[in-house]
Image (cartoon, rainbow, N blue to C red):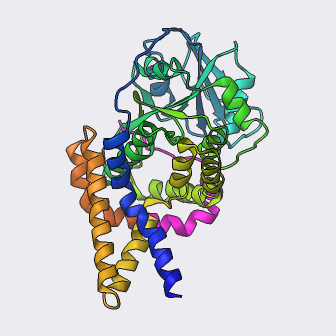
Amino acid sequence: MEFIASLLQALLGYNLVLPVVLYLCYLLFGKKTKPVAMSGKPYDYAIIVTAYEQTTLLPAVIASLLKLNYDHYLIYVVLDNCGPEDIGIDHPNVIQLRPEQVLASNTRSHFYAIDHFKRNHEILTIIDSDNLVDPEYIHELNVYFDQGFDAVQGTRAAKNLNSTFACLDAARDIYYHFYDAKLLFALGSSATLSGSGMAFRTSLYKDALSGLDVQGAGFDKVLQAQILKMNKRIAFAGDAVVYDEKTSNSDQLVKQRSRWINTWFKYFILGFDILFKGIKNASINQFLFGIILLRPPLFIFLILSFLCMVGTAFIAPFMALSWLIAFLLFILGFLIALMSYPTDKRIYQSLINIPKFIFYQVISLVYAKKANQRSVATRHEVNN
């Protein structure tokens, strides 16, 4: 029984030290130079924007996309369950699609757009209905398509830091982009997908998800697993920036995190398959990615680790000290991620509210089982 308890603590505690281990490996072995675009080939892009019910932010999104420093693209806006009202967009590069039936699914919306392509686009990129894009977004993606990659994840930066929740949400994104994207890719594995700001050769996207009707949140988890099963790498384009609307209040946070937690419990098992394939194929790409997929959500392993530290404080002081050291290493790893990025001082100031942020995620855990019935997509407030 004591051995099992120690094994469970080890399996849990390694998550605290994993970031620092990855960082040390990155310093010793990681590829740190950005590749240079080679062919200059003008890939033909389909930009797919999916909207569910809410269209208020779409004009700003489309205006941002039309300012891209690129000529070879069309924008497909899938207006799922959005009503007949005009959204005020009239441009030859913008195709508005209104499904006859409610889709309520990202992949259904994506394939609806693919089925209505005006031409045979080589590459598709997925943008959320609350995103803004940097004018050089496509050029930065092309750097990696020129290198032969078939899938690329860009950086999702914070569009708004108008509340404590938004700042903490942004801090979380910086942490995951650093370890689960930049460092993983530099070590020969793949960047994890983030739901938007990502691009694929159209043929790969269709091969990966054709025949899979992914409902609810988590299509990106299924998609990345399918790509990794092929032992293809997902590149990380750190300079391909998409600005993402961060959750600004507790209600948004609870609904969004409920869906995300539901997604982890639903799909984390895919990590075992990829991990074992990595061992069988001697593939660092699959092996490292499988380890990352099996990691619990941040707040869950932090809470469980804290309980282990407190629980061993009086019966096994040495073990409690080990937990304390592991926590300090995790904090160091978190700060390394923030310092690697031009992090706004408001984000640093918000860190004191992490316990409050974790509390609302515990509330999210309560609602996780029926998260997709309560909320299909995050509704964002419009800031005038």
Residue at screen point 27% across, 49% down: 336
Q: Quadrant of the N terminus?
A: bottom right
Q: Quadrant of residue 97?
A: top right
Direction bottom: furthest residue: 315
Nearer to me, 31 or 83: 31
Instruction: Name the side, left or right, on which 269 lies relative to 135.
Output: right
Direction right: furthest residue: 211
| Image location (x, y in percent) of residue 318 | 30, 82
Residue 252 vertical position relative to residue 198 in the rendered view, above or below: below
Q: In the image, which residues are magenta?
A: 359-384
| Image location (x, y in percent) of residue 215 | 70, 48
Does 310 lie within the magenta span? Answer: no
Q: Quadrant of the C terminus?
A: top left
Count the marks. 0
Nearer to me, 55 or 349: 349
Residue at screen point 41% across, 49% down: 247
Does 362 lie within the magenta span? Answer: yes
The answer to whether residue 360 shows anywhere in this view is no
Residue 54 vertical position relative to residue 319 in the rendered view, above or below: above
